[in-house]
Image: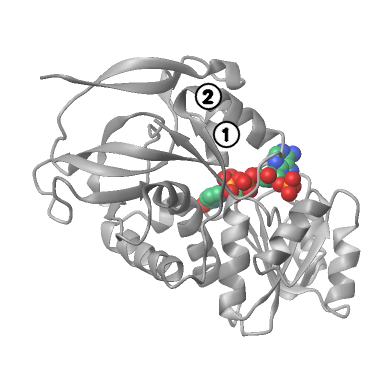
């Protein structure tokens, strides 16, 4: 019996109108692969970059990098998962916007029973990102309890996970967000301070909150609109980790500026370097699952869309209408 899957594809880069629902055949997993039937699929800002072509992939392209469901078949050499297991992943290559797919098994992990499919689909890419940022993308000497950190877009998917995780680690997270309502939400979930960066000068406010010192690290996924000002929020030897471009790509940087502004460090990390091996993916996922099952991090799913309404989901995400995580239901 041949299987098929309702799948979202694009034939050309462009706006949300490019997203098309098609029926596609799905084959058997090859060596090192598995086939999963999705119960839920995560929506991520990277999906927008891939749809527009900011991050280029060969066309036609099926989007989506995060999902949760049940393993339907495993290929040769796959031993950490079996048919019938509940599972979740953040993965390369894209292709999660569908009912079922074949993908490399090394990025898929068992989903603990205490975590729902919806949460699993919402949290893997965003939660593993919060994990590698707060645990492993650190200024010289690391962070200590009580330290201030600045986190942009704090009411978003990655942001609300980071607010809670930072609080659990004892850090004073200063979160920026685009409305007073989003700021209130970030504070409710653990941000020590918030700044509405549409109405307030966030550099001045960070200086005020930190008694003129600035922060040791800025986690900046907004990119073009915030990058230069983020440098001005840092203490000497501080770290700017730019991990996204929601407002556009950061322009080329004159590295001499890093000397002038206090011997600063800049990093441009991506989750996919961190989860390149199965062992590392499992270790990071175990840390994330521990935070969630202990109740220290709650996965807020504020938007749910049928898979067929994916274009509306993209419009809402790009219009900054969403908070927390969004999922698609196949
Ligand atoms: N490098 C990595 O490993 C990695 C992994 C995961 C995610 N990311 C990045 O992390 C960021 C957050 O991802 P997410 O999926 O959780 O998305 P999200 O934070 O839920 O959504 C993006 C948010 O960015 C803010 N934003 C600021 N300027 C914007 C603009 N001009 N257009 C649209 N949004 C703008 C908006 O919040 P306000 O209205 O509050 O400003 C918006 O809600 C994204 O930039 C993503 O690419 C990077």
Disc 1/disc 2 C-alpha distance (Å): 18 Å
* Mark in front: 1 vs 2: 2
Quarter of the image containing the C terminus? top left
Q: Is residue 231 left or right of residue 246?
A: right
Q: Please say if 36 is above or below 150.
A: above
For label 1, being within 8 Å of ligand 1 is answered: yes
Q: Give the crowd class for mark 1: few <14, some 14-19, many >=20 residues within 10 Å.
A: some
Q: Earlier in the sequence, mark 1 or mark 2?
A: 1
Q: Is residue 94 left or right of residue 228?
A: left
Q: Nearer the viewer, residue 312 or 151?
A: 312
Mark on residue 309? 2
Q: Is residue 92 visible?
A: yes
* Residue 250 placement (x, y as % from top left): 70, 44
Q: Give the crowd class for mark 2: few <14, some 14-19, many >=20 residues within 10 Å.
A: some
Q: Is residue 305 left or right of residue 148?
A: left
* Residue 54 placement (x, y as % from top left): 59, 31
Residue labelled with disc 1: 49
* Residue 171 placement (x, y as % from top left): 65, 78
Q: Nearer the viewer, residue 97 or 180?
A: 180
* Residue 292 placement (x, y as % from top left): 45, 66
Q: Is residue 141 left or right of residue 99?
A: right
Write the residue at 59% across / 30% down: 314
Q: Nearer the viewer, residue 251 or 38?
A: 38
Write the residue at 39% across / 40% down: 40
Tell me where residue 320 sits by quadrant: top right
């Amino acid at each position: 019996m041949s299987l098929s899957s309702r799948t979202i594809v694009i034939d050309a880069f462009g706006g949300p109108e490019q997203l098309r629902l098609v029926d596609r055949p799905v084959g058997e997993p090859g060596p090192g692969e598995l086939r999963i039937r999705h119960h839920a699929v995560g929506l991520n800002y990277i999906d927008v970059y891939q749809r527009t072509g900011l991050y280029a992939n060969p066309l036609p392209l099926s989007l989506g990098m995060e999902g949760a469901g049940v393993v339907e078949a495993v290929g040769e050499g796959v031993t950490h998962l079996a048919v019938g297991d509940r599972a979740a992943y953040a993965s390369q290559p894209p292709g999660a916007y569908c009912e079922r797919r074949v993908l490399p098994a090394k990025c898929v992990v068992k989903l603990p029973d205490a975590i729902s499919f919806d949460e699993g689909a919402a949290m893997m890419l965003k939660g593993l990102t919060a994990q590698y940022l707060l645990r492993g993308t650190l200024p010289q000497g690391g962070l200590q309890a009580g330290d201030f950190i600045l986190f942009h877009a704090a009411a978003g998917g990655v942001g609300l996970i980071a607010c809670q995780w930072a609080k659990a680690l004892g850090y004073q997270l200063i979160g920026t967000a685009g409305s007073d309502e989003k700021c209130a939400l970030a504070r409710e979930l653990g941000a020590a301070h918030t700044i509405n960066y549409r109405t307030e000068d966030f550099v001045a406010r960070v200086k005020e909150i930190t008694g003129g010192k600035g922060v040791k690290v800025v986690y900046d996924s907004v990119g073009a609109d915030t990058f230069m000002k983020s440098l001005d929020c840092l203490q000497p030897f501080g770290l700017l980790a730019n991990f996204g471009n929601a407002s556009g790509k950061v322009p080329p940087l004159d590295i001499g500026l890093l000397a002038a502004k206090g011997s600063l460090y800049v990093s441009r990390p991506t989750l996919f370097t961190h989860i390149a091996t199965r062992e590392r993916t499992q270790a990071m996922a175990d840390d994330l699952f521990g935070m969630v099952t202990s109740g220290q991090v709650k996965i807020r799913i504020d938007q749910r869309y049928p898979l067929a309404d994916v274009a509306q989901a993209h419009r809402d995400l790009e219009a900054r209408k969403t908070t927390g995580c969004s999922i698609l239901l196949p």
